[in-house]
Every structure is written in C-alpha cells, then in structure tokens.
Image (spheres, rainbow, N blue to C red):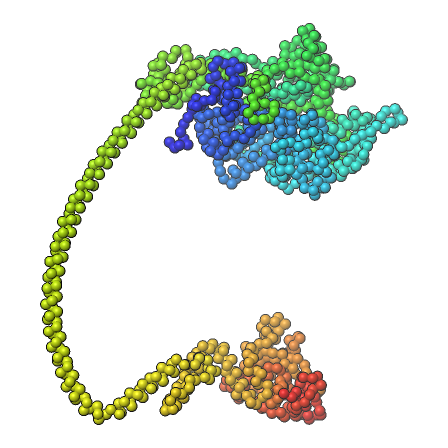
Amino acid sequence: MSKMEVKTSLLDNMIGVGDMVLIEPLSEDTFIENLKKRFDHNEIYTYIGSVVISMNPYKSLPIYTAEKVEEYRNRNFYELSPHIYALADEAYRSLREQDNDQCILITGESGAGKTEASKFVMSYVAAVCGKGQEVNKVKEQLLQSNPVLEAFGNAKTVRNDNSSRFGKYMDIEFDFKGDPLGGVISNYLLEKSRVVKQPRGERNFHIFYQLLSGASDDTLKKLKLDRDFSKYNYLSLDSATVNGLDDAASFRTVRRMDVAGFNSEDYFLLLVAAVLKLGNIEFKPESRCNGYDESRVKDKNDLKEMCELLGIEQSVLERAFSFRTVEAKMEKVSTTLNVAQAYYARDALAKNLYSRLFSWLVNRINESIKAQTKTRKKVMGVLDIYGFEIFEENSFEQFIINYCNEKLQQIFIELTLREEQEEYVREDIEWTNIEYFNNAIICDLIENNKNGILAMLDEECLRPGTVTDETFLDKLNTVCAEHQHFESRQSKNSKFLTDHSLPHNCFRIQHYAGKVLYRAEGFVDKNNDLLYRDLSQAMYKANHSLIKILFPEGNPAKVNLKRPPTAGFQFRASVGTLMKNLLTKNPNYIRCIKPNDKKAAHIFTDSLVCHQVRYLGLMENVRVRRAGYAFRQAYDPCLERYKMLCKQTWPHWKGPARLGVEVLLTDLQVPAEEFAYGRSKIFIRNPRTLFFLEEKRSRCLEDLATLIQKIFRGWKCRTHFLLLKKSQVVVAAWYRRFAQQKKYQNIRSSALVFQSFIRGWKARKLLRELKHKKRCEEAVTTISAYWHGTQVRREYRKFFRANAGKKIYDFTIQRIIQKYFLGLKKTMPSMSPIDKSWPARPYGFLDRTHQELRRIFHLWRCKKYRSQFTEEKKATYKEKLAASELFKDKKALYPSSVGQPFKGDYVEITKNPKYQKLNSFAEDKVLLADVVSKINRANGKVTPRIFLLTKKSLVLADQKTGQVKASVPLLDLSSVSVSTQNDGFFALKLKEGSTSAAKGDFLLSSDRLIEIITKLHCIGATSADRNQISIDISDEFLVQFKQDKVCVKFIQGTPKNGNGVACKRKNNRLLEVSVPSP
C-alpha cells in the first residue's frame, strides 16, 4: 500500500467530534461548542451521519487542491476527516456503480456559502470523471454556466457580497461509464423586485455594474450608456462598488463564455441597457377636462433612446404608459393612468423584462449544455436554493422562500427516516418508530388547495371588486384563526389581542425553524405580478426578434383574455415538480452555516450560529439519527480498528470478520443491549460505548507503541553489536593479511637485491670479455683496411693523372646544369597564358635550351588552361579567334569588340511574349537575335528591325509587332561587305537569280557588326552543303538595289548630328556614308 493509500479513520486525530451523532452529551450548547472548536482550527466540515455541515470560513483554505481530490477519491465516506469531497465522491460512486440517481441539496441562509459549495461539488465531479476531448468540452460547458448565472442572478446584500437571488437546480446527466453528457438547469423565483428597488446597503444585480464598468467605450456608445452609476435611478449608490469584486474583469469573463453564445452576440446587452433607461423615465401629472389626472413623460430623451435600442415606436410605448385598455368579452374600455399607476406600469415592465431575459438566458444555457444522445442517462442533481429567511421586515418573497424550505425540511425528514428504516431492514435490525416533529401541518397551512394561504391569496387576486392587502388579511383571520401555527392580532384567538409584538397589518407563522412575522403589505400586488396588456402589445411591436420571444402574449393574433397564473401559483407548481423530482433520487445534504454577519474570518457568533442551527433543524436531525443506533460500521474495518483490544483477535484474525467482532465485544464485556449485529455491520446504540472502545484502543496503542519501541531498541542494539562483531573480524582479517603481505614483500625485496647483485657481477664480467674480443677484431680490421687503402691509392694515382681534366669538366658542367634547373624551379612564372615573363638566362651556352624550355612551358600552360574550358566557352573562343582572323588590323571597329562577350540573344526572344510567334517561325535554334537598323534605299534613313540568325537562314522582322519582313536562306547569301572605318554598316549580298534577290541586297547597321559577321562566317565554315561566305572589307563597294547597282562610299567627316554616322543618297548611283574621324 503506497503512502497516498494509508488508511485513516474519522475518529483519528479528531478536533472536537467529527460526527455530531457521536457527541456526548447531546445538547444545543455542546453542539454549538463543537462547531466553534472545529471552526477555530479551520475544520469547517462536520458530519451528522451522512449530512455535511459546512461553515463559511470567509477565507481561502488549502483543502481543495488536486492532491485532496485524489485523497478522497474512491474512499469510504467515514474513512477520512469530514469534507465536502467525501459527500461528492459518495454520490458519484453510488451513481456510477449502483446506477442510483443522486441529488445534492445545499441549503442555508444568504452568505453561508451555498454557491461556493455547489462549485466545489461540480469541480470535484469534473475532476474524477473520465477524460477525453468530448468529455472535457461538456465539463467545461457545465462549469462555464456559473459565471453567467451569477452575473444575472446574484447581487450584493447586507449579508453577502455575492448572494444568489434565485433558486437553482441543475441535473447533470452521465452515461453508463460515469462520464458527463450534459445538464439541465431549472431556476426558481428570481427576486425581480430588486431590479427597481434595493434595500439600504445593497445593490442591484451584478450585470448592471459589470456592464458599466467593463464594457468598452464603443459598446457603451452603441448602447447609449454612461459609466457614471449616479445617472441611473435603478442603481443604488451607497454600495455601487464592493471590495473584492472586480466588475470589469467579471464582465470580460462573461463575454468570453461560449456556453450561451455570449462571445459572439451582444443583443442581450441591449435589454440590460433598456432596463437602465427605463428606470430614468419619469412622469408628471396633467389635468384633463373630466377632472381626472393623466400622466405624461417629463423628459422624453431616455424614452427615445430606449425605443431606439429596442426598435419600438416612441408614440406606442408613450401611450402605453398613459392609458390602459381593459377587454371584457367583445368590449374594450380605455382608461387613463395617473402618475402612481404609470410608475407602477414602468416598474412592472422593467421587472418583467429582466426576469424574462433571465429565463431566456437559462434556456439558452440549457440548449448549449443539454445531452446530445437520447439513450438512458444517470442523473445527479445539485440544488442551490435560498435558506430560511427571517428579516426585520418579511414580505411575500420571504413567505414563499420559507414555504420552499418547509417543503425541503419535510422531504429531508421523510428521506432521512426512510434511509434509516431501509438500512435497518437491509441489516435485519428491528425497526422502532421514531418520534419527530412532522411539519406537514405547516405545509398544509400554506399550500392547501382550499384553505391554504396561497390558495386564499389567489382567490383574493381573482375576486372581482376592491381587493387590498387588508381584505386578504381579514380572510386569513377568518379562515386560519384556529390553526395552531398561525397568529394574528385580529384573529378570533383572544391570546393574541394584547400581543404588542404583533402589529395589526401583520400575521405570524410558526415555522419548523421558528416564528416569522410577515407584513401583509404588497402580498396582493406581488402575487398578481400584473403587466398591463398595452405594455405587452407595445413590446411585441418591437423590431427586435428577442423582444417578440419574451412577450408572446402581446401578439394581436393570439389575444388571450384569460388571466395569467399568479406568482404564488407558479412557484407552488414549481416546488411540487421539484419535490417529485427529488423523491425519485437518492438525497445527499449539505447544510451551510454563516459564522458571523461581518463577513470576516476567525469570528464565531454563537447566537447567529445557534439561530441557523435551529431553523435548519440540525438538532432534530441528530436526534432522528440517534433514535436507534448512533453508530454503525462494517465488520472488516471495525475488526481492523479494535482487534488489538483482544488477545484472540490480535494480531491476525483468521476467521470471518463478524465472528471476530463477536469475540472482541464478548471479551470486552460490552452489555448486549448496547449493540446489535447486522448482516454486514455492527450497530452501536450509545456513543459512550464507542468512546469506551476508542479510549481502550488509545491506551492499548500506547502500550503497543511502548512494546514496539522496546522491541525496536533491542533489535537496534543487537544489530549494532553484531555489526561491531562482524567489523572486528573483518578488521583482524585485513590486518593479518596486511602483516603477511608486508613480511612477504620484505623477503621478496631482499631476494631481488641479492639476485640483482649476482646478475650484475656476471654481466660486468661478460662485458669485459666481449669488449676485449671486440677490440682484438677491430684492430685486425683496421690494419687490413689501411693496407688495402694504401694499395688502391697507389693504383688510382696512376689512372687519375691520365684523365683528370675531362672528369673535372664533366663534373663542373653537371653542377652548373643542376643549379640552373633548381633556380628555374624557384623562379617559374604564373600559369596565365598571357603572362610573357620568363627568368633571365644565367649562362650563354644554355641559350637554346633556355628558349626551348620557355616554348615547352608555354605550350603546356596553354594546354592546361584549355582543359578548363566548357564546350560553350570553347565555341565562344573559336568565334573570337575567327573574328580576329577576319578583322584584326582590317576593321577599325574590331578593337572595341574584343572585350565584349558574344551573347547571341540580346532581345530575350524566348522569354518575351511579344516575340513568341517570331520564335516559333524560326525552325532551328536561334544563334543570334538583335535589333539592327535597315538603311532605306531611297533616302538613307534607318528603320529598326529584329535580326534573327539560325544555321539555315536569317530573318528580319518588325521590332514593335514582331511581324516577319524578310527571310533569307543562307544558301542564297554570297558575300558580306563592310568598310574599314569605325562604323557598323554591312551589306548582305545575295546570289543573282535566287528567290531572295528579287528586292536586292540588304544594307544594315549594327553596333554588334563584328559578332554578326563572325557568326555568319563560322556557319559557312562548319556547313558541308554550302560554300563559305566571303567577307569583303573595303571603303567602296557595290550594292544591288532591285535593277540598279549603287556604290556605297565611306568618307571621314563631321556629320550634322555631331557624333553619329550619317548616310545620304547623292544620286542614283552613289550612297555616301559619313564616318566621324577617329
């Protein structure tokens, strides 16, 4: 078992008593004292059996972390200290494993932490259920519904800065695996009277302040609103800002919610703005000729802006505030409204507009979070509803809230007793009837269909004639005077006639939580909840589609003369539906208590807590739980906890757990009437018996701890002694080994020294002998060498004197040549073919050799340079070589063309879409494409042409259009004539009799003359089927123009244009070209 899984018990390390059922003695004082003791130690949760009491700590506690979630996950309810997570886990596991629908009822007064408790329950369920993209989306949508509902349904009150002013019941639906599928939210009795009036120290619903604080300037301008709270009559100013609430941040959070489409739709804000504008509409009286007062709107600006927001005609709404139409059968009667009635109509419209908007929002959220599958689903309901309310002045709202709590108390008692009885029957324990206060008589007083207070209130509202709160109170005094839980000053019961704590216009009901004094004023109006039909019809005429949805009764085509149901009737029906729903589910209860009215931490007000304990019926709950057996526990954990109290069960019991518990209790001599054996649990009647077991267990644990310490210390000492003994043996063994090793090393060292001396003496002796032998051998060799040398020198002297000169000469020449080549190697020129440098000749007799080496090196260098050429570059150099052979020292234009590369295509004919047709005309690869100037035969003027050259033909085309003007096969070309001057003129002479020669020769001009003629020459030189084109270089040559031959003559002069070449026709036989002087 891992560290996280170490099991503890509710009874371990208790601060006070964790379960109120075990408190001894049981009284209201001990109950409150136990709550206070646990609250002071930040233990805010306490059990009453399976009911959780939650104290609001008014501060953050580190008990809601992910580690806590894992700690309570899949644990028994009583296994760990009390926590809301234990209840949530018990409900979720029962739903998932036993297929039982669950409901969690959260009650308590405003500020007790009901909303936060519901959040903790939902967050725990979201944390422990399954994972996955779809499941996470559903969980996110369920959690996102809270901020939206809080913004529209919560408000700051004197008791709570974030008080829920509506009842909320959410059914969370799960699949068979326990993964959430969706949910359904039901809302009950929104306190819509808060929209038009708030008590001192309180404020309106949060959304109004959030909108004005957090909306952007553009949004406020669009809604025709101002950030100043004081400009709106419906907003109280004394509590406009609340410490700890960031309205702007809350508004941004609401706008980001996807759950109801708030992140993309702003039209619901129009209705919120309209309510604020509606509150600023004021009326003034205006007398009519018939003597009746009629109301008129004072300042129509707010009315106009509201009508613009909702798309209503101003005159229609203004008339609805001044007149009321009453329909009876086929007649319509229109009456005027005085100022008081107009204000009533305005406030009624504001309340209805906001409450219907809230209901619409709830429906939108339900559409968003509803389950998409239609299969059977498991359901967990979470009810967060107002607690019992007792104020200084209690009205209709408090009456129906307390009625709802009476019904919840009734179902609580019934379900608690039923659960107790079912467990007793399941465990085969005899059931004894439990005496308790049944509040059904109070529920009947309120909801009886004939004589109930709600029924009489509805009867008064529907009765013709004058109906007031006084007539309603008179009727109550008449019908309910004898009821033991109803009190009134005007009833027939004489004991209340002199009760000055009971005003004449009030009545008092003795609820299960105490007596509550209700002021009858406003009961009839609030129950009627009447909205004039004229206002409904005016709202239906709005252009806004949402308004039509909220006010369907205003549709003229569906006029219903039937009176709408009263507020009391609707609420009673909703409560009835809720009770039926709760009765079908397994209940789980969370009772929330507020420790003080200052909303401060560490303050526990005994009187306030005592009051809440009373009206929540917690003492009665404890008594019901303790009426039979106060404590019950399964046999296995019971035996595991108390087995050390009996020698027969300690340390391990090998038989059934129940038999072990029987042996244990028999050995402890516990009286038989104090316990009972169930099928799977042991039932203990009195908490004293349990505390007796706990006390003996505590003493036994101390004895066991002492025994464990003694055994551990003995084991520790023995272990230490054995370790020392083992260490001593090891140390002795190591020391003996070390001593023997030392002795052996000394003997070995001595032997080695002795051996080394002996070997040294033998080696030195042998060395002396070898040296002597070597000296003898060397002496013989030296003598022999000297003798042979003497003989050789004698013979050599004779030979050397005869051939000495020639050998010295050859040796000298060889040394000179060797020095020459080494020097040449060091002074070798670069590898560039145009580098003409060469080292100087050092000796005259090497002149021919020097020149030949220079020639060979140059040839080798050129070969190495040529080997680097690509085929394209070789072709270019061949053309450059051909140009040199043709024009060098013959044409003045040639030197300027040497440094220019031959590109070939100068007009990008393949890329230019304008010449696409021209490119397709040329069948072969285009070798040269350039713009040339064609010389006019008549006047010598020039015309630009595209010149294309291929292997088979040349083409002249129009530069602008790309249209072919002439195409000449190269076979028809006989020669080309150019001048010796620095000009670009050249004549293409055609063969006589050829088809191309009909119009005569071509006289053209180009800056790239050298490249054009070189390519023409090269094409003729490489072609086997045609003769090589001859190149004629002369300052005078004849050109055939149709039938005439014209002489083209080049002269040096100054043309009129300054520096260009000028061409002029002198006569029919002469064309003179002026070329600038060089």
**Residue 926 appears left or right of 353:** left
Image quadrant in which you'd find residue 987? bottom right
Q: Position of residue 530 (x, y in %)?
A: 73, 25
Rendered view: 933 above or below 583: below
Instruction: Locate the C terminus and report the quarter of the image it occupies.
Output: bottom right
Residue at the spot x=75%, y=26% of the render?
561
Q: Position of residue 565 (x, y in %)?
A: 69, 24
- In depth, the one of 470 and 530 nearer the eye is 470
Q: Is residue 242 visible?
A: yes
- In depth, the one of 36 and 678 nearer the eye is 36
Residue furthest to the right: 289
Q: Position of residue 536 (x, y in %)?
A: 74, 31
Q: Is residue 105 visible?
A: no
Residue at the spot x=22%, y=38% of the render?
730
Instruction: Locate the N terminus and report the quarter of the image it occupies.
Output: top left
Image quadrant in which you'd find residue 428? top left
**Residue 280 appears left or right of 376:** right
**Residue 516 appears left or right of 879:** right
Residue at the spot x=24%, y=33% of the render?
724
Q: Position of residue 422 (x, y in %)?
A: 47, 18
Rendered view: 119 above or below 753: above
Residue at the spot x=58%, y=83% of the render?
896
**Residue 130 appears left or right of 169:** left
- In depth, the one of 704 and 662 nearer the eye is 704
Count the numbered circles shown: 0
